[in-house]
Image (tube, rainbow, N blue to C red):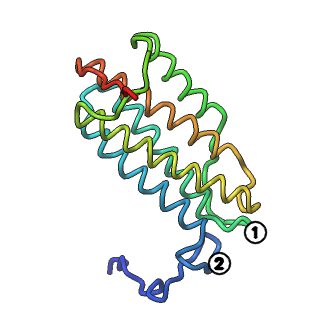
Amino acid sequence: MAMKIYTKTGDKGTTSLIGGTKVPKSDLRIEAYGTVDELNSFMGMCRDLLKNKKSRKVLLTIQDRLFIIGSLLACDPAKETKMNIPNLEETDIAFLEEEIDKMDEVLPLMKNFILPGGNKSVSALHIARCICRRAERCCVRLQMEDALKDSIIIKYLNRLSDYLFVLARFTGYQLQVKEIPWKP
């Protein structure tokens, strides 16, 4: 018999971290990995919207790293887990930086702030960037409460939001969509 998706254990507003510790569903750790999950799901939609095969492949790699981040955040930091969860590495951040630099080489110089929009793909990437920034803020709050020891997650999310901004511009550039300058 297949395992049921519902367990009914969360009906009273609690859930378990990897390691078994029960916490309220309002716990900042749950908020952090829930926001990373939201970002990962939205990245899937962005990947579905994009036409550029290289960009789609990069987003799939990023989704894998977001799954790692979500898993790391779902662990009780006070307990040893028996699960073999891969780590995030500095090379993952270097990969994002290299991709940003490649796109920046062909993009026109930005002379104004730009408003998100102009195409569904561009808009979706900007929404993903905003979700990424929210995930980053959740992780910063976790770190401020000494509940997140490894700052590489924050660094990765920070760089990812930069990547998504540049990818939104690059996608618009490839589709010949004019950027919408903000004119104060």
For the C terminus, give its image quadrant. top left
- Compared with residue 178, is residue 91 higher up or lower down, i.e. above or below? below
Please give the name of the residue rendered at 39% of the width and 11% of the height, measured from the top-left corner: 108
Identified by mark 2, the residue type is Thr
Residue 167 drawn at (x, y percent): 40, 28
Please give the name of the residue rendered at 73% of the width and 69% of the height, measured from the top-left corner: 79
Q: Which of the 4 image quadrants contains residue 173?
A: top left
Q: Residues within 10 Å of mark 2 (few under 14, many from 20)?
A: few
Q: Which of the 4 image quadrants contains residue 2?
A: bottom left
- Compared with residue 41, is residue 3 higher up or lower down, i.e. above or below? below
Q: Using the image, tell me which numbered label, if any, was put on residue 78.
A: 1
Identified by mark 1, the residue type is Ala
Please give the name of the residue rendered at 51% of the width and 17% of the height, measured from the top-left corner: 101
Q: Using the image, tell me which numbered label, if any, was put on residue 171.
A: none
Name the secondary structure under disc 2.
Answer: loop
- Compared with residue 145, is residue 182 higher up or lower down, i.e. above or below? above
| In-front residue for pair 99/176 | 176
For the N terminus, give its image quadrant. bottom left
Rounded to the nearest angstrom, the CA distance separating label 2 from label 1 is 9 Å
Q: Is residue 150 left or right of residue 55?
A: right
- Asked whether disc 2 touches disc 1, contact meaning CB atoms under 8 Å apart, the reply is yes
Tell me which numbered mark, 2 or 1, is placed earlier along the sequence: 2
Name the secondary structure under disc 1.
Answer: loop
Residue 88 drawn at (x, y percent): 62, 43
Circle 2 sits on which residue?
21
The count of marks equals 2
